[in-house]
Image: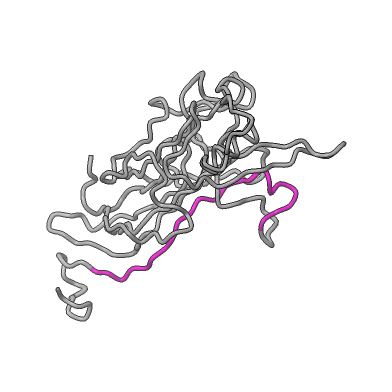
Amino acid sequence: MRSMRDIDPTDANAEHNDRSTWDFASASFDPAKQGVGSTPFNDPTSSRVAVPSTPTFFGPRYLIRLAGVAVAPYTKCRIRGIRQAVNIGVDIPGATNEPDFPLDIDQVSPFWSFIDGNISWHLRYIAGAVLAGNTRNQQSGQAGTSFDYARGSDSSVVQEGQNVYPGSLTAPAAAGVPPGRNIGPLGTFRDLRYPWILRTDVLDAEVIGPGLLVFFASVKQTSPLTRGRPLLAPNANLSVLTREDQFVIAYPNARYTYVAGSILCDMGATTRRPGASPTQGDPPLT
């Protein structure tokens, strides 16, 4: 293997590895930060995306774009890792004349889900795509929303428009199936295998621009009114249950409240191969 000093920058077939490592994480409007702010800039944003509260038993799942990376033409993105986080929670009534108090916990059990709801995860590459405008919504009373199905990189709930059901959103085209091609077995998976607080540089995969590398979550929102409750004996030992099941038993109106994700990758490496256009990079994969 040649060192950087051995590489001729005029060599059309050389690969140049002057790159940097970045962690592209979710960031979106957080209802809990409204009127409080989260930075010195007084923006009501956090590193997670609020999941719409309306159950999805009547329609498609919510498709949420967690994080995205624009890969420029003629460059490579080396994927080093991804991270995931899920919150379940409930709004508890406040004292007289006070607003509801939001209460949530992190999901820690890797395979847990509601009996009528769940989350799937999708790392996809949309070859040839270009960035749309910034659609992150930081000032309104709902989570960031985007009407661009396959060109955005901002954290948002991807939708076509308002649903007839109050407070709900419609899913995008293809019934909420995420766009792009699979990044190996991570194109679709169903568990928390890359927890937010643990080391993430355990992957090694590359994509070549132009295109968008995007991490999606597809959420089937639970319905607290119809999912039923377990019939427990008066002396049942709840400590043997998962932390999540204990929370749901204590707060029967619990639902999915937030999801978060990030992509750790090396950016900046260029690639020059025979037949590749220096302005467009390698031909997009289909």
Query: What residue is drawn where x is 66% and y is 60%?
Result: 39
Q: Position of residue 141 (x, y in %)?
A: 68, 38
Left of 6 or right of it: where is 261?
A: right
Q: Position of residue 165 (x, y in %)?
A: 60, 20
Outermost residue on the left side: it is: 274
Residue 135 visible? no
Left of 21 or right of it: where is 253?
A: right
Q: Position of residue 172 (x, y in %)?
A: 45, 29
Image height check: is 20 above or below 235? below
Query: What residue is drawn where x is 57% and y is 38%?
Result: 237
The coloring applied to the image is one colour
Residue 11, quarter of the rendered image: bottom left
How many numbered markers are drawn? 0
Left of 243 or right of it: where is 149?
A: left
Outermost residue on the bottom side: it is: 5
Q: Nearer the viewer, residue 55 or 182?
A: 55
Image: magenta residue range: 16-38
Image height check: is 92 above or below 226? below
Q: Would residue 22 be counted in the magenta stretch?
A: yes
